[in-house]
Image: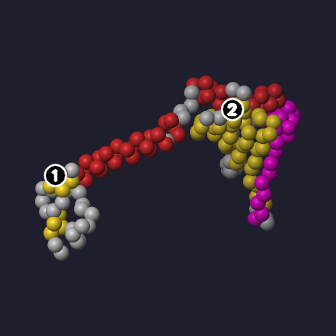
Amino acid sequence: MRRTTWSFRGRTAPEAIPCPAQGATPRPTVGRSLRFARNDAVVLVAALLALTPSLTFAQSAADSAGLVAAAKDYIEGWYDGDAARMARALHPELVKRIVNSDTATKRSWVDNQGATRLIQGTARGGGNRTPRDKRRADIKILDVFQNAAVVKIDASDWVDYLQLVRISDRWQILNVLWELRPPTT
């Protein structure tokens, strides 16, 4: 292998760098590589920060308040049997789903209920049979992006994952996926 030196912008490399053949693309010196690596790292970090939704599209205080208000109307409306609060929280196209299983046949299916069924169930009393000291309604906003959000409600006997949409400056629940807690013995 022949040893050749190369120059970059009129500067000769401080030491000879072996090249596989005359005319091959020269490799930069170590000092130059580190400078490029630092610049590349800065560009990479800036790109990652720009692409991170939680930093660039953080929710406003009004979004947080609207999401919590809709979640409270939903869960407190259920516990109190208040159909008006439940209706206020729900988008008319709401679908609430749970996966049910038959332990004997080991068959599973998805049960759906729409806004009307949920509002009617609330009007018939909903969760008002749950004693007040057993009512749990822990609300946590999981994610917000523009006009879409996901909120978790940790309730007495189940957990709800709510998908909400902002329509006409009001947050409404569009979808719910929920799961019952296993019975305690």
- Sequence-first tag of 1 and 2: 1
Q: Which residue does the numbered mark 1 point to in the structure image? A: 11
| Residue 130 at least partly seen | yes
Image x and y of residue 57, in percent: 54, 34
Q: Which residue does the numbered mark 2 point to in the structure image? A: 166
Image x and y of residue 25, in percent: 27, 63
Mark 2: amino acid: Arg
Q: Quadrant of residue 67?
A: top right
Seen in the picture, residue 16 relative to 49 is either above or below; the reply is below
Q: Secondary structure at mark 1?
A: strand
* Crowd band around label 1 with a 10 angstrom C-alpha radius: few (<14), some (14–19), many (20+): few
Query: Badges 1 and 2: C-beta atoms under 8 Å apart?
Result: no
In the rendered structure, the answer to whether residue 154 lies left or right of residue 102 reads left
Q: Secondary structure at mark 2?
A: strand
Q: Nearer the viewer, residue 182 or 88?
A: 88
Q: Quadrant of residue 90?
A: top right
Q: Give yes or no for residue 112 being in the magenta stretch.
A: yes
Give the quarter of the figure containing the N terminus: bottom left
The residue mark sitting in front, 1 or 2, is: 1
Return the residue found at the far left. 15
> Mark 1 to mark 2: distance in Å?
60 Å
Seen in the picture, residue 51 relative to 87 is either above or below; the reply is below
Residue shown at 80% from the left, 40% from the top: 93
* Crowd band around label 2 with a 10 angstrom C-alpha radius: few (<14), some (14–19), many (20+): some
Q: Nearer the viewer, residue 1 or 105?
A: 1
Give the magenta part as a residue range.
Answer: 106-128
Residue shown at 73% from the left, 42% from the top: 175
Mark 1: amino acid: Arg
